[in-house]
Image (cartoon, coloured by chain):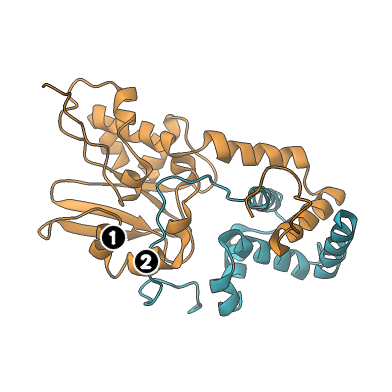
């Protein structure tokens, strides 16, 4: 049942999980562990403000600034600090390492044990990332997984899979598309997709203008 | 711990159910669950590691059958009960009250 945003639908009984969470919230509020308004704010933050646009800003900066890019690739401690300087830090982003796609290497990220993901820069992970098919196969058949997701990596290109942990999260620095010389940071950001930073996709291609 | 959650390398899960874009919470209760977990760990009622372990300790059949945020729910409820902060009995009593009031 899709939530309409109302507390409950009179025509369909709430699912067990919905009822359980409602009861849990009710008791935690009553016992003064949580406040409903504070919960609202957390939900709103992750529904509206914390998402892959943050990561796109990091990657666009790296494309334009070689010093910033070097910091991103210098290990989790340095990259986390560099990411924080752009305003992105906090829960599930305490240690974010960045790995670079090159003509020789394609990187992809998974969390086989649960759903670890760099929330401050990519938001909350999509359902497919957290589910059995991806978690199980990314580490044994990455090329097959990528192909299934529409990405054909040439056989002579190395594929590296990074299994996230409770301690370290990963992001992929995608290759900058050709034909973007002189582009501004906001323009470059538009090309950088969530999937390109997970490694299950590429940045948007530049389409030639009609007649050019 | 060699539990069901340790999925890397397992066979048989089938096709990836990919979607290009989706809201972070598919149902309203998922958002509430997310925020509750953030709050109870922020308060120090439980830490993230023991909460993660609570999911790993789920019955394997249950782990594979329920939706993602139901894993979160299971572990939070279990830990609050084990730590004598909020009993499963109280939770189920409240569930019955809510159900009766909405009937």
Residue A3 location in percent, x, y? 65, 48
Image point 58% across, 48% down: which residue?
A: B25
Residue A176 location in percent, x, y? 21, 35
Q: Is residue A210 above or below residue A126?
A: above
Residue B80: quarter of image = bottom right
Instruction: Give a yes or no on whether discs 1 and 2 share a subunit.
Output: no
Residue count near mark 2 (Cα–Cα under 10 Å), binned few <14, some 14–19, many ≥20: few
Residue A73 location in percent, x, y? 28, 43
What residue is disc 2 on? B15
Residue A203 location in percent, x, y? 27, 39
User: Which of the image's four quarters has the N terminus of chain A?
Assistant: bottom right
Residue count near mark 1 (Cα–Cα under 10 Å), binned few <14, some 14–19, many ≥20: some
Per the image, label 1 sits on a secondary structure element best described as: helix
Image point 48% across, 41% down: which residue?
A: A120
User: Which of the image's four quarters has the C terminus of chain A?
Assistant: top left
Residue B17 shown left or right of residue B44 in the figure: left
Residue A191 shown left or right of residue B50 in the figure: left
What residue is disc 1 on? A148
Residue A194 shown left or right of residue B69 in the figure: left
The tint chain A carries is: orange
Q: Is residue B13 above or below residue A56?
A: below
Tag 1 near tag 2, CB within 8 Å: yes
Q: Looking at the colours in the rendered structure, which chain would you say is drawn in cyan?
A: B
The chain under label 1 reads A
Residue A75 appears anywhere in the view: no
Residue A194 appears anywhere in the view: yes
Q: Is residue B36 above or below residue A79?
A: below
């Amino acid at each position: 049942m899709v939530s309409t945003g109302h507390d409950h639908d009179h025509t369909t009984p709430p699912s067990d999980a919905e009822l359980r969470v409602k009861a849990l919230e009710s008791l935690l509020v009553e016992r003064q562990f949580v406040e409903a308004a504070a919960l609202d704010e957390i939900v709103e933050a992750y529904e509206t403000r914390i998402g892959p646009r943050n990561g796109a800003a990091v990657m666009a900066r790296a494309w334009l600034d070689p010093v910033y890019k070097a910091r991103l690739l210098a290990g989790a401690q340095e990259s986390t600090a560099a990411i924080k300087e752009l305003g992105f830090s906090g829960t599930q982003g305490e240690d974010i390492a960045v790995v670079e796609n090159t003509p020789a290497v394609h990187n992809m990220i998974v969390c086989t044990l649960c759903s670890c993901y760099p929330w401050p820069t990519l938001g909350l992970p999509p359902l497919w990332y957290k589910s059995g098919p991806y978690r199980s196969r990314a580490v044994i058949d990455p090329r097959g997984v990528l192909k299934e997701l529409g990405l054909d990596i040439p056989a002579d290109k190395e594929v590296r899979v990074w299994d996230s942990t409770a301690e370290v999260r990963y992001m992929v620095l995608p290759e900058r598309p050709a034909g973007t010389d002189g582009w501004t940071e906001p323009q470059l950001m538009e090309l950088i997709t969530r999937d390109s930073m997970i490694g299950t996709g590429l940045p948007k291609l530049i389409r030639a203008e009609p007649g050019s | 711990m060699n539990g069901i959650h340790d999925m890397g390398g397992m066979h048989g899960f089938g096709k990836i159910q990919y979607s290009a874009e989706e809201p972070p919470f598919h149902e309203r209760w998922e958002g509430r669950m997310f925020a509750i977990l953030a709050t109870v760990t922020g308060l120090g009622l439980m830490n993230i590691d023991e909460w993660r372990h609570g999911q790993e300790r789920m019955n394997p059949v249950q782990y594979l059958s329920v939706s993602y945020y139901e894993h979160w729910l299971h572990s939070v409820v279990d830990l609050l009960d084990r730590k004598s902060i909020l009993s499963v009995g109280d939770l189920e009593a409240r569930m019955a009250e809510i159900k009766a009031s909405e009937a």
